[in-house]
Amino acid sequence: MPTFKALVVTKPDTGYACDFAEFDEQDLMEGDVTVRITHSTVNYKDGLAITGKSPVVRRFPMIPGVDFAGEVTASTHKDWRPGDHVVLNGFGVGETHLGGYAEKARIKGDWLVPLPYGLSHAQAMAIGTAGYTAMLCLMALEAHAIAPSRGPVLVTGAAGGVGSVAVALLAKAGHEVVASTGRTEEADYLKDLGAAEVIDRAELTGKVRPLGKERFAGVVDTVGSTTLANALSMTKYGGAVAACGLAGGMDLPATVAPFILRGVSLLGVDSVMCPLVVRKEAWRRLGNELDRGKLAAMTSTVPFAEVKEVAARILEGRTRGRVVVEIG
Ligand code: NDP
């Protein structure tokens, strides 16, 4: 039986293991499309899955990797033919369905989107789940009529993956972007991506007051916890906060004051089960609106062999921007 190279998470008696292995093709899961994967990437959730730090993986053995780009090699799905170039992210891939850290995947054709026009596989993965989530946040703020004329937009965890793409996309859309980071040495990097101002994340981690000074018309929050609570209290009357992350914690020590006294809206953003029609629009816009030079500036590339090392670093908040993994 043919095999292919994969990173495989298992649950031996000793706990949790993640190692490279030759995976039997016959052990691939059900699906109507087979893809030769060329590139994947490392998102925060991949870090959790590889290290086992949070229960992201819900089936064993599992190939982690929540997204990939590649070429269709076989299909019985009406929309896909061998030779098509595709992107996949979410739908439980890398969590409940075998994922992207492998030379091959078998998945449902309904989960795929076409590689956006003008993007290479590597560029699509430089965007990856993180960049696509940043676009979903921008779209959520736009749907709430947060126009540039209403005031600055805050991005938290700005030097991370979602944050870096959010800074570039918001700036391109004409917003005055305030980038919050724990790494103020990355101020020049963030200004090059389009931030008008860079603030220390400590400004958002102090005691949460029910209402703070009204500073931001909108917020893209990747951090959660006290940071999100403070961002809410600093949001202007009628503003909106798109919450997508928990890099600083899953709790939310906030009060209802911003909602009931300033009409602030908290907009939840989920990328995993996001409907295909929204997903396709987000990828289409990323293909059109994300500056390729800025995308390159925020991206580093590693060989497949280094993915475990990067997973550990991303959980420590030590990766900058996006990390692409070359699979084959
Ligand atoms: P990254 O690690 O690349 O970015 C997270 C950033 O958050 C870090 O770079 C750092 O930025 C900041 N940060 C890290 N730890 C802390 C901390 N303890 N307190 C405050 N800030 C911290 O991860 P991603 O960009 O891939 O993901 C960001 C978040 O978004 C994650 O929580 C992830 O799970 C979530 N996410 C959610 C999705 C959804 O569907 N809702 C989809 C994709 C991601 P800096 O150094 O600039 O402060």
Image: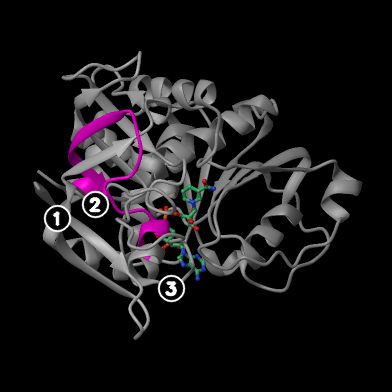
Residue 148: give its label.
none
Labelled disc at residue 53? 3
Residue 290 lies, with reference to residue 260, above or below; the image says above
Q: In front here: 196 or 145? A: 145
| Residue type (three-letter) at the residue carrying disc 3 | Lys
Could you tell me residue 244's position as x and y percent? 57, 49
In the rendered image, the vertical position of residue 63 relative to residue 238, given as above or below? below
Callout 3 secondary element: loop
> Furthest residue to the top?
78
Instruction: Name the residue: 28% across, 23% down.
Output: 115
Residue 154 in magenta stretch: no
Q: Is residue 32 magenta?
A: yes
Q: Are marks 1 and 2 in contact (CB under 8 Å)?
A: yes
Query: What x and y, as percent, mark residue 67?
Result: 33, 43
Name the residue that disc number 1 marks.
304
Determine if residue 299 is in view. no
N-terminal-most mark, 1 or 2: 2
The image quarter containing residue 245 is bottom right
- Magenta segment boundaries in residue numbering: 26-47
**Which residue type does callout 1 highlight?**
Phe
| Residue 57, above or below 13 | above
Q: Nearer the viewer, residue 326 or 293?
A: 326
- Disc 2 marks a residue whose amino acid type is Tyr
